[in-house]
Amino acid sequence: MTERPRRSVDGVLLLDKPVGWTSNGALQAVKRLYQAKKAGHTGSLDPLASGLLPLCLGEATKLSGLLLNADKSYRFTCRLGVTTTTGDAEGEVVATRPVAPFDRERIEAALRRFTGAIQQIPPMYSAVKRDGQPLYKLARKGIEVERAPREVTVRALRLLRQEPEELECELRCSKGTYVRTLVTDLGDVLGCGAHVSALRRTAVEPYDAARMVTLDALRERAEQEGLAGLDRWLLPPDSAVANWPAISVTGDSAFYLRQGQAILAPRAPTQGWVRLYQGERHFLGIGEILDDGRVAPRRLIGG
């Protein structure tokens, strides 16, 4: 079978990744549907997890690292009384313990211990590398190695629902936060053990779940409307930095930026990162304010 020609298409798709799919598997399915030459995701979701997975196509891949580093929000279900090898429902059961009746105050007090800046030890079943090898590959061989704790920030952690052996919570956190580790540690604090039985990502700043699209909906539109219909679901690359200050420059300044040179721009902020536009709408990319007030190009889009 002859492979369909790939095309240049730029934008961000907010995919509702289904349970059971790897992030890369979902990415490749979308890449095929769009016949895209270039595509990348913005941080993996475990196969157990569903929800928001921003996919960057074409020139938008240059901004994917910004989304990888962004704050994220989740809803998760915590199964009390059972610990597993992976910290979620996909792992083998390590231990089961009785679950004492907890009042809501005790649960919320335990959750408060995990808000703010906290230390987490990355799980063995993670993509963190040790001597160039992902930890999960070592874990599958039955090898466990020492891992250094990492500081992450939990901005909000709220109890939504409480059952005798199950909790449902809402979380907003910094990059690098492992929900599985948080739940395992919460189970230790409560004294009964716990693991993640369900996980859904609801936001990757600046995006939320409102504009997500499923794989089934993509396939249906591809059949009915073709590539033009699919393209209408794409957000522009600059949507990834929609909350940043914007600077508009002239054609001459845009030329120098594309040569890698810093420029002086009117009404620029005094520090930080900015969106760069030629005129009002033509997105050039992102820049950084230097100490002398000039704007240096950091990642530019297109030619």
Image (cartoon, grey):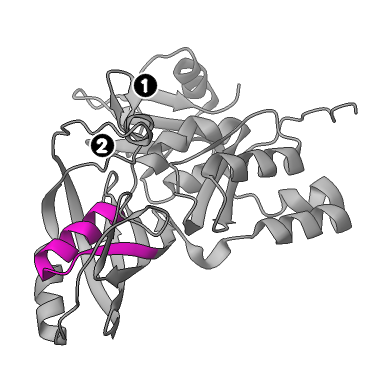
Image quarter (top left, top right, bottom left or bottom right) of the N terminus: top right
The percent coordinates of residue 259 (x first, y second) are 47, 12
Compared to residue 55, the image places residue 300 above or below, namely above
Q: Main secondary structure of the magenta part?
A: helix
**The quadrant where residue 176 appears:** top left
Q: Is residue 49 left or right of residue 139?
A: right
Residue 280 seen from this side: no
Q: Residues within 10 Å of mark 1 (few under 14, many from 20)?
A: some
Q: Is residue 48 above or below residue 145?
A: below
Q: Which residue is mark 2?
A: 272
Circle 1 sits on which residue? 263
Comparing 158 with 162, the one in front is 162
Give how far across and how far down residue 283 sits, in percent. Answer: 54, 36
Q: Nearer the viewer, residue 118 or 85?
A: 85
Q: Which element type, helix, strand or loop, lies under badge 2?
A: loop
Q: Tell me which label, 1 or 2, sits earlier in the chain.
A: 1
Asked if residue 199 shows in the view, the reply is: yes
Amino acid type at circle 2 is Gly
Q: Label 1, secondary structure: give it.
A: loop
Is 191 magenta? The answer is yes
Specify the segment rendered in magenta: 179-197
Does the stretch in magenta take in 284? no
Whole-percent x, y for residue 207 in the image: 46, 56
Query: What residue is shown at x 61% (from left), y 21% (from top)?
Result: 303
Give the distance between the C-alpha atoms of the residues marked 1 and 2, in whole angstroms: 15 Å
